[in-house]
Image: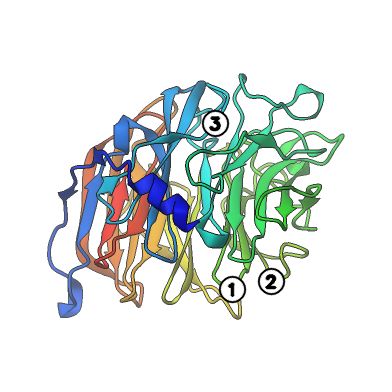
Amino acid sequence: MKRAAGNVLRTTAIIVVASVLVTGAAAGGERSAKVTVMRVPGGGIQPQAAVDGKGVLHLVYFKGRPAAGDLFYVRSEDGTRFSDPIRINSRPGSAIAIGNIRGAHLAVGKNGRVHVAWNGSSKAAPTGPHNSTPMLYTRLNDAGTAFERERNVIQSAVGLDGGGSVAADDAGNVYVTWHAPEPGARGEEKRRVWVARSTDDGKTFGRERPAFAEPTGACGCCGMRAFADRQGTVYLLYRSATEEVHRDMYLLMSKAKAAGFKGRKLHAWRTGACPMSSASFSEGSAGVLASWETAGQVYYVRIHPATGRCSAPVAAPGESRERKHPAVAANARGKVLLAWTEGMGWDRGGALAWQVFDRTGKPTTEKGRTDGVPTWSLVAVFVRPDGGFAIVY
């Protein structure tokens, strides 16, 4: 992939003008973790960001009609100047943005290869079994100049509603995940999380398998998130739908390449309505971070990679009933940035807000809020090469 990096970066043309929006100085006299806020390149929405082992930022986003648009990929070595965009989906209009949580997910795997998965739109091809909605997957080619033609990975677990996800590790394992009912069953309480695994860096995928034996159900129109850490442990976050009212957040972990997951309930939430929520993961110096929404508030935890133990959930300060779509990242000094949206709703944009926490989980005075998150969008966060944070919206 060395040649790939050179080919892409020679086309660098997009310059993103960022503004620093931070209030106050860091608590306890610590150095400030400067927070930079920027729009998605080209006016796109639904950004997803990942930083590889060499510090290169990879970003995917959506443009076009919300019901049938396109996905694009850019990269950056400094977090401000981006390469020319490469379209990800080979079939025009095969991606969807409606609902905020059905769009592309991004993972960076072996040798820095980029992997992308998303729910197909009504224009997508190939479709799933019996002309069902496909869970589409593609990867950057060996030259780093284009994405391969997308493929559907669903063989039997049809019934996509909320969004799927993708994870990849340095050993060449790639995992595409989604939730759907057991074949032949119907209803949210019959939904399960499914995992299709590739052991050859995304060239081929095996048949999907259920991730968790416990009958929790899955919230139909909520998103989920997959992640693989530096040791190859696989993590899944999803919202249950037990008895259609227990919409709790569950964390699944597997140290056996997704051959078996252990699960735990992270946070309880009793509601009869689908909240259309999303979740996020990232990895920092102190372990893996996970964030989610419960009852209009956003939270994060640290997960110890060896034991799987989680810290107590840390909530964003203050009260709000409209906090959604959290994203989390930690820098080398142990500071954590939690960002989220406020006031978002069906076919309605809103604002973004953020808070920086110290290594113990206490909020610092570094925080901010700005309007302008577009309809159907959300936010992504990453750590800049200088150790500061960036938010893309």
Looking at the rendered structure, the secondary structure element under dot 2 is loop
Residue 383 left/right relative to 19: right
**Mark 3 crowd level (few <14, some 14–19, many ≥20, 10 Å Cα):** many
In this view, the residue in front, 15 or 351, is: 15
Dot 3 amino acid type: Asn
Q: Which mark is residue 321?
A: none
Quadrant housing residue 321 = top left
Horizontal side of 262 relative to 328 (left or right) equals right
Of 316 and 146, the residue lying toward us: 146
Mark with earlier residue (1, 2): 1
Three-letter amino acid code of the residue under disc 2: Lys
Q: Is residue 220 left or right of residue 290?
A: right
Can you see residue 248?
A: no
- Please name which of the two marks, 1 or 3, marks the residue nearer to the observer: 3
Q: CA distance from mark 1 to mark 2?
A: 9 Å
Is disc 1 surrounded by few (<14), some (14 to 19) or many (20+) residues within 10 Å? few
* Residue drawn at the location 61% of the way across and 62% of the way down: 235
Residue annotated with mark 1: 231
Image location (x, y in percent) of residue 79: 28, 53
- The residue sitting at 51% across, 47% down in the picture is 143
From the viewer's perspective, tell me whether residue 296 is left or right of residue 390: right
- Name the element at disc 3: loop
- Contact between labelled residues 3 and 1, with CB atoms less than 8 Å apart: no
For label 3, the residue is 89
Disc 1 and disc 2 in contact, CB within 8 angstroms:
yes
Q: Which residue is mark 2?
A: 255
Asked if residue 293 can be seen in this view, the reply is yes
Q: Tag 2: Cα neighbours inside 10 Å, few (<14), some, or many (≥20)? A: some
Residue lying at 22% horizontally and 57% vertically, measured from the top left: 35
Q: Earlier in the sequence, mark 3 or mark 2?
A: 3
Q: Is residue 264 above or below residue 244?
A: below
Give whichever of 42, 54 is nearer the camera: 54
